[in-house]
Image (tube, coloured by chain):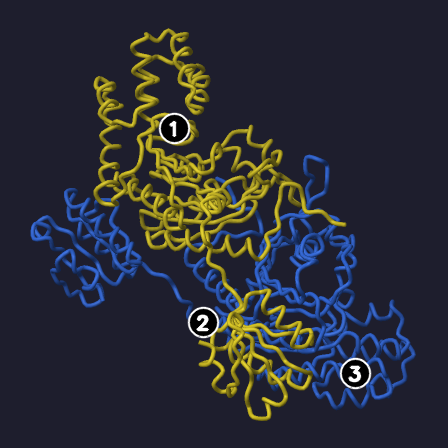
Chain colours: A yellow, B blue
């Protein structure tokens, strides 16, 4: 009769167990790295998001008016709200400020496989430092989060947008030409990049060098090509320090230099990184982040900022693709009152077990032993406790091991011990 | 520059720690009672809520249109979405189905003290049983949740709307007259109730008996007044069974019978209950629940349903009012590189501690020993680890106990043990 809104989801208990596992695992890693959780409202004023991402973003946003006629928007992402929060209330906190968050975000586009109109993001921001060790730690944390949730196969790529910008400048590529080049670089269509560079009047050798930088993971080759570009060289030295910390201090060696990371070029500045799950095919990016500037735009005092976002749903999908064995909280004990007269004693036994921290359920339908045992078996409980009137006269109950089928009679006072 | 939307909130790390503590505590009790978590979207089609609560609810709802022109609504409560979910996808699950959930809800009214436009609710539904033991367990769980979160002073009130309805019928009170009476009963304005009953032509003695039932917590007095009302008597017997289980099996004795619970009379049926925190004064209700009918209205096969909702913010407020000592996750160790040369080794020590599960942070601003120790002290860490070049030559670092000020030099390999 009533439909769920298009592009949104209900989550069953089985799905929620997986989602809570993932959330708690991500949270634990954030916390161990000294990050602290914050939360912002589900909606913000629309102008917050247009200020960050331009008017074009409106098309993809759920917006509505409040009673004061102000335009509100269901948040499409979480960085803008958190930076608004920072500018509003957290600027005086000691630096660096390390914040993490989880939140549902909303995207008003056509639903397609793996893309939903409501989806969850995890993310973080570090404010107030831009030392290489700070960014090394940030990247190491993103990587550690995805390893700690249980993913086996993740690929870390690190780039630097300032080097790319510097190269564009040296090659005298105009902003308009950059706009044509960037989508091609993003899609790794290097033949097309080469043609377009030549159309822009770039010499063949120079264009080849540029393509080499985009495609190599060998930092020495990059150094060689940019050796006369002071600005790019400075950035590269900075990048090398980050990589050095990653390798030596965090023991993360299997990353790739990837200068072709260009997504968000108008937003990120300097160091950028992505983490992919190759098992997911085309839609493989789980995490993206880097240094960016947003605080001054939102009216705050300029301060270095960096952060990353993790696609919660895609990370879950990657775990499922790797057939990760999610932990589940099962009902351990099922109590069966044999007849109406034993219900009160049964509830008392249930209550005692629960107080001891044992997840326990009880037949609340008076369906009798046969059906109750069948149900207990269907939900995979370890033990059933059968509370019959005869045994009760002796202050005893029957404990049945649901796997072996073995039964024993125990005193009520000994029930808890007899369950192990 | 950008404002948070009126009536909504940002939560600082300190507030989030409290909120997560409360959420996790509530969740743990739900789970130990065999309830399983579900989640539904943040918005639904508007007609879902008008079907449940009437057109009047629109005024208090944030609504907007999707691209297909359909009216959507930010959910004002969670029962309607969960029952939609049940009808849609869970009807074939084994009964009873015990579901719990957390979710942000939205209310489009004038913000006032303690009332926000976005607020969190915790709640649950049990579907497929209406035995007295099921409802006793439901009420016991609500009470246990609020005790387990750490509240000392909560008051449980239990009523029954069918008894009240039966009394209205016997007194020949019309529906219109009931509508006038109910708000007065809700506000405990019994003198006004008495006057109005007399205006309705109810005999003085009968009106007095009715008022007695509304005000007494003595079930024997109620029994005496309704002894000729077969329908009310049946309900009372049922209520007595619930109370019996509560007292004997769940050991919950400090409840009150309260027949004046009338809120939601058009929605709830039969057993109803409320739990208050007297410390909160006028706005003291933390939890409300009972049996209700919604499944057939949503197109599902008729099945008994009951549930309750807990006001998350108000429960938090009650804990704060009782000066509850919330647990907090602190940074335990702060690592201080004395100069640039010791940063990589410092990060390595940090990384090792984090891998061992020790929440550790490090100076990422190169601010030197003095300022770093001051910062470490301001965030209340237990130990600072000072990594200096001389000690490093001996593979050692200095560990400082931040409380006593005591310092000792230890080998890097022994750092973890030396922290205890």
Compared with residue A244, is residue B256 higher up or lower down, i.e. above or below?
below
Tag 3, which chain? B
- Pointer 1 and pointer 3 on the same chain: no
Q: Is residue A346 left or right of residue A235?
A: right
Asked if one can make out residue B120 in the rendered structure from this viewpoint, the answer is no
Tell which tag, 1 or 3, sits nearer the viewer: 1
Disc 1 to disc 3, C-alpha distance: 75 Å
Marks 2 & 3 on one chain:
yes
Residue B211 is tagged as 3
Question: Dot 1 surroundings within 10 Å: few (below 14), some, or many (20 or more)?
Answer: many
Whether residue A43 sits left or right of residue B96 in the image: it is left
Label 3: state its secondary structure: helix
Going from the N terminus, do you reach mark 2 or mark 3 first? Answer: 3
- Quadrant of residue A294 within the rendered picture: top left
Residue named by callout 2 = B324
Alpha carbon of mark 1 to alpha carbon of mark 2: how far?
Answer: 49 Å
| Residue A255 found in image quarter | top left
Give coordinates of residue B308: x percent, y percent: 64, 67
The residue depicted at 45 percent of the width and 53 percent of the height is: A325
The chain under label 1 reads: A
Q: Which residue is mark 1?
A: A261
């Amino acid at each position: 009769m009533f439909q769920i809104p298009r592009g949104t989801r209900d989550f069953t208990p089985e799905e929620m167990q997986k989602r809570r596992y993932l959330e708690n695992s991500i949270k634990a890693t954030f916390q161990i790295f000294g990050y602290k959780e914050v939360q912002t409202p589900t909606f913000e004023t629309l102008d917050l998001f247009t200020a960050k991402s331009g008017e074009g973003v409106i098309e993809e946003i759920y917006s509505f008016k409040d009673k004061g006629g102000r335009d509100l928007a269901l948040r499409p992402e979480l960085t803008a709200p958190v930076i608004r929060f920072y500018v509003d209330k957290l600027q005086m906190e000691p630096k660096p400020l390390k914040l993490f968050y989880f939140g549902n975000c909303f995207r008003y586009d056509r639903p397609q496989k793996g893309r939903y109109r409501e989806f969850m993001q995890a993310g973080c921001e570090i404010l107030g430092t831009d030392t290489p060790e700070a960014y090394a730690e940030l990247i190491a944390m993103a990587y550690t989060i995805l390893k700690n949730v249980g993913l086996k196969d993740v690929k870390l790529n690190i780039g630097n947008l300032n080097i790319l910008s510097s190269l564009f400048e040296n090659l005298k590529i105009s902003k308009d030409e950059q706009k044509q080049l960037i989508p091609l670089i993003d899609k790794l269509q290097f033949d097309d990049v080469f043609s377009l560079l030549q159309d822009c009047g770039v010499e063949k050798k120079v264009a080849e060098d540029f393509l080499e930088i985009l495609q190599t993971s060998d930092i020495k080759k990059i150094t060689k090509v940019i050796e006369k570009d002071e600005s790019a060289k400075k950035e590269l030295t900075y990048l090398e320090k980050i990589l050095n910390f990653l390798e030596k201090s965090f023991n993360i060696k299997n990353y790739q230099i990837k200068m072709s990371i260009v997504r968000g070029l108008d937003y990120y500045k300097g160091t950028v990184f992505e983490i992919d799950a190759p098992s997911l095919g085309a839609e493989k990016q789980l995490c993206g982040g880097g240094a960016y500037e947003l605080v001054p735009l939102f009216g705050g005092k300029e301060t270095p900022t960096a952060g990353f976002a993790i696609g919660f749903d895609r990370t879950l999908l990657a775990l499922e693709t790797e057939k990760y064995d999610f932990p589940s909280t099962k009902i351990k004990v099922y109590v069966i009152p044999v007849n109406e007269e034993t219900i009160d004693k049964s509830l008392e036994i249930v209550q005692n077990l629960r107080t001891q921290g044992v997840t326990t359920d009880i037949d609340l339908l008076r369906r009798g032993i046969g059906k109750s045992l069948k149900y207990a078996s269907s939900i995979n409980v370890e033990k059933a406790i059968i509370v019959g009137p005869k045994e009760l006269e002796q202050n005893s109950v029957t404990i049945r091991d649901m796997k072996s089928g073995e039964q024993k009679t125990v005193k009520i006072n000994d029930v808890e011990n007899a369950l192990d």
